[in-house]
């Protein structure tokens, strides 16, 4: 604390007028009279990076957030200077830098309209205590502007009027509005005047964001250290902003194995082995599909990572193998805390090689977690990550574990007021030594990254599966995630819905919450409603702390068990649809879940909707969030939608009541959609089948759908062994045409499509496949509105009367 010094009086400091300008290929340097430098880099036509230095010197340019694969290059760049401004023009953006103040304004290059402007812009406060500056940015907030994103914040989808902090924090039983919680994702999107842009503030110190909370007309963000370093990403569609953000910060490096998109069952803790097997057997006996079973911390010997409690798990290899034979993939937890124990080789090796984090003056960072007193690997050091990756050899290659769950990596420390490391802990930060103030928010991501590389190596030629609790921007490249310790309440069901949507629009689609709630015990009704939502999240896992009773699908009585089975079966049927959405996410960054604002931003009625979302491209979901509900009011986005359960067609662009008793939920399909479905399986790959279903929802007009497929594991798909099918549907009064376009070299095991037509406005009188008339009786017309045909057709043409 600085008391009555000159510094205190200094307060906020501002750049003065520009006295020097220099261009270096794609980077412009503006220097002010008082020594501030703005380094403006045109990354792409729609992406500009702003970096400010208050000393004239910049830090080494290093970021954990930005992927080395980020694309660069623009099609047009023009720089002009007039009396008051420098004007930087690309094909998408016009950026004006004011000479007097260094303030920035951004306009759409096409219609010249304002997108975003600095209010006071960049300013800073010197930080005596730690050195450096508290760096700040204030921007004007337009009247009808709304804000979204920012990772796991447990609030409604629209962030306007709220203030947040990013400091990864272990937040057991967090509640609505608790801030911060586990993740630090300093990226938001905004929309005003039907123009959407995003800001990625790539700074791993504690960052804060104020969305017109303190002042109605101002949105600001600041950090406790480091540089003011942000990327301005223009849309004007929010979808494109998110895509471009994932172009910068990365997308998953590989598709997940398909089993990872199945249903997962977890608890703290399933042990001993007989108990694990009892659980997996019950899934099979009751025919509730399930692909993964989790072992929480109790499988270890005294919570020592990479060991087994031999009393409870005498032969882990044998157990894992047996589980696998029954379709269950074993996922085990690995925490960062390494027990201080000279008899324990992981600890010994870490100590000998000097891999653990140290305090400022040299002693090790000692903290209490589950194993008791621990040291913690410094995952921000490449050598340490390499070592950590190697530790997975036995677990993955030999024992056969298929996935790893990284917990407590905020990092969490017990029995200390700040729940984490003290600020003075030192980190390597990949050769940019720093204190924990800078490394805290990235610690979990670097742990997950090292874990990922271990799994990738030892699971080869299969694909790895990692799940993490803490994350910074970019973690989506390596891992999936869950939202930490939620609670079995109705309010938390709504939070889970908002968090999954928010994560998806923050570039992190492979996410889900503990279904049913981690703390406390849900009633059967809440559990059923939660399953209904959870099966539409990319990551779908039941987990609970266990000290409040059982939370398997069958413990709430038969009615609930049947509902759970129905919805988990639906998830398994829709796996090809989800897999296609995942492929799209990896391929171009399209979020798997789309909040309505992201789905249709032009319709301002969507800007404050939080409950409804579009799953993939064409399925509208709205969970029931209240007890005893027999349905609910919801907003249907513009266009025509089919009620999934009744095939009734509704015209969107309005709110309406939708029936949904406990065994149902509001679910709609976009007209014109072709929805692929597998037969129900108890686990991915259980059955060989000769056909899959395509549900075709008639539309008067044109629509297009995609179906991606590959071997569901392994990397052959990267060598062209995938199959991408595009179905173009054209509906006329008495005709329906489906054109199929195929690419890729993968040949799926099935031969036929069973095409089911919904709502055909005519009776089929004749059918042509690839211009050849087919005798109606030659086609397996089980139902009048369905036909089975070879999957390689090019054009299917139905005629009717
Ligand atoms: O301090 O490993 O969020 O999912 O079951 C609790 C035990 C540590 C917190 C995780 C939770 C996990 C639990 N862990």
Image (cartoon, grey):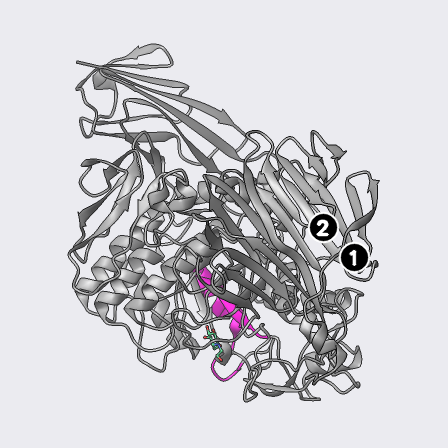
Indicate left or right for 371 with 612 as reference. Answer: right
- Decide whether residue 372 is among the magenta residues: no
Residue 763 in which image quadrant: top left
Cα separation, mark 1 vs mark 2, equals: 9 Å
Q: Is residue 512 above or below residue 169?
A: above
Residue 779 in which image quadrant: top left
Q: Secondary structure at mark 2?
A: loop
Which mark is drawn over residue 36? 1
Q: Residue, x 61% and y 42% (percent of image)?
A: 106
Magenta-highlighted residues: 309-335
Q: Position of residue 724 (x, y in %)?
A: 49, 32
Instruction: In the displayed orientation, state which residue is furthest to the front.
Output: 83
Label 2: which residue?
102
Q: Is residue 700 visible?
A: yes
Circle 1/circle 2 CB separation < 8 Å:
yes
Crowd rating for badge 2 (residues with CA inside 10 Å; few <14, some 14–19, many 20+): many
Which mark is drawn over residue 647? none
Q: Position of residue 40 (x, y in %)?
A: 73, 46
Q: Position of residue 100 (x, y in %)?
A: 73, 49
């Amino acid at each position: 604390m600085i008391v009555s010094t000159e510094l205190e009086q200094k307060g906020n400091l501002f750049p003065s007028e520009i006295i020097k300008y220099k261009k270096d290929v794609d980077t412009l340097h503006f220097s002010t009279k008082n020594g501030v430098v703005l380094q403006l880099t045109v990354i792409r036509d729609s992406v500009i990076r702003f970096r400010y230095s208050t000393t004239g010197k910049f830090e080494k340019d290093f970021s954990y957030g930005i992927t080395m694969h980020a694309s660069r290059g623009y099609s047009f760049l023009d720089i002009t200077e007039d009396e008051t401004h420098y004007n930087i023009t690309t094909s998408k953006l016009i950026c004006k830098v004011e000479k007097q103040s260094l303030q920035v304004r951004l306009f759409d290059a096409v219609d010249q309209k304002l997108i975003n402007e600095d209010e006071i812009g960049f300013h800073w406060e010197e930080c005596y205590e730690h050195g450096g500056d508290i760096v700040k940015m204030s921007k004007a907030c337009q009247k009808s502007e709304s804000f979204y994103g920012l990772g796991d914040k447990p609030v409604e989808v629209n962030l306007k009027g709220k203030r947040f902090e990013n400091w990864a924090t272990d937040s057991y039983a967090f509640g609505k509005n608790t801030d911060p919680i586990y993740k630090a994702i300093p990226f938001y999107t905004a929309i005003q005047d039907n123009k959407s842009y995003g800001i990625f503030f790539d700074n791993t110190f504690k960052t804060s964001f104020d969305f017109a909370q303190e002042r109605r007309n101002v949105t600001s963000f600041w950090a406790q250290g480091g540089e003011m370093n942000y990327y301005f990403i223009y849309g004007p569609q929010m979808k494109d902003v998110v895509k471009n953000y994932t172009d910068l910060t990365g997308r998953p490096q590989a598709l997940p194995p398909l089993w990872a998109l199945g249903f997962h069952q977890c608890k703290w803790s399933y042990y001993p082995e007989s108990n694990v097997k009892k659980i997996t057997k019950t899934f099979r006996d009751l025919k509730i599909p399930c692909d993964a079973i989790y072992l929480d911390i109790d499988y270890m010997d005294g919570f020592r990572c990479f060991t087994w409690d031999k009393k409870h798990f005498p032969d882990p290899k044998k157990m894992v193998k047996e589980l696998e034979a029954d379709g269950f993939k074993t996922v085990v937890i690995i925490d960062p805390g390494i027990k201080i124990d000279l008899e324990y080789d992981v600890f010994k090796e870490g100590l000998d090689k000097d891999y653990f984090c140290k305090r400022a003056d040299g002693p090790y960072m000692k903290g209490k977690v589950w194993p008791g007193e621990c040291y913690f690997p410094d995952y921000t050091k490449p050598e340490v990550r390499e070592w950590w990756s190697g530790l997975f050899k036995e677990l993955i290659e030999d024992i056969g574990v298929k996935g790893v769950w990284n917990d407590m990596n905020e990092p969490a420390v017990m029995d200390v007021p700040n729940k984490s490391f003290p600020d003075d802990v030192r980190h390597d930060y990949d050769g940019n030594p720093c204190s924990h103030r800078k490394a805290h928010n990235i610690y979990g991501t670097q742990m997950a990254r090292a874990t990922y590389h271990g799994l990738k190596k030892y699971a080869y030629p299969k694909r790895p599966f990692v799940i993490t609790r803490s994350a910074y921007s970019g973690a989506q490249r390596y891992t999936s995630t869950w939202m930490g310790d939620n609670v079995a309440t109705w309010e938390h069901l709504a939070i889970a819905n908002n968090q999954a949507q928010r994560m998806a629009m923050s570039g992190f689609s492979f996410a889900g919450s503990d279904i049913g709630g981690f703390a406390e015990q849900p009633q059967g009704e809440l559990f059923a409603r939660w399953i209904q939502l959870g099966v539409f999240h990319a990551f779908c896992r039941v987990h609970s702390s266990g000290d409040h009773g059982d939370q398997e699908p069958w413990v709430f009585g038969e009615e609930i068990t049947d509902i759970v089975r129905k919805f988990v079966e639906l998830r398994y049927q829709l796996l090809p649809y989800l897999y296609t959405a995942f492929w799209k996410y990896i391929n171009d960054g399209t979020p798997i879940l789309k909040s309505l604002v992201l789905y249709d931003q032009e319709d301002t009625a969507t800007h404050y909707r939080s409950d409804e979302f579009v799953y993939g491209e064409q399925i509208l979901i709205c969970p029931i969030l209240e007890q005893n509900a027999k349905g609910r009011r919801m907003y249907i986005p513009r266009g025509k939608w089919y009620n999934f359960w009744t095939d009734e067609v509704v015209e969107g662009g309005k709110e309406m009541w939708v029936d949904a008793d406990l065994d149902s939920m509001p679910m709609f399909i976009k007209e014109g959609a072709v929805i692929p479905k597998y037969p129900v399986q108890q686990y991915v790959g259980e059955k060989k089948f000769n056909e899959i279903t395509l549900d075709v929802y008639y539309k008067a007009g044109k629509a297009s759908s995609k179906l991606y497929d590959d071997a569901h594991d392994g990397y052959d798909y990267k060598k062209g062994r995938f199959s991408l099918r595009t179905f173009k549907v054209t509906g006329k009064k008495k005709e329906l045409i489906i054109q199929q376009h195929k690419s890729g070299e993968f040949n799926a095991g099935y031969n036929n499509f069973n095409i089911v037509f919904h709502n055909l406005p005519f009776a089929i009188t004749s059918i042509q496949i690839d211009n050849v008339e087919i005798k109606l009786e030659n086609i397996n017309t089980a139902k009048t509105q369905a036909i089975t045909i070879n999957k390689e057709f090019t054009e299917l043409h139905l005629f009717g009367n």
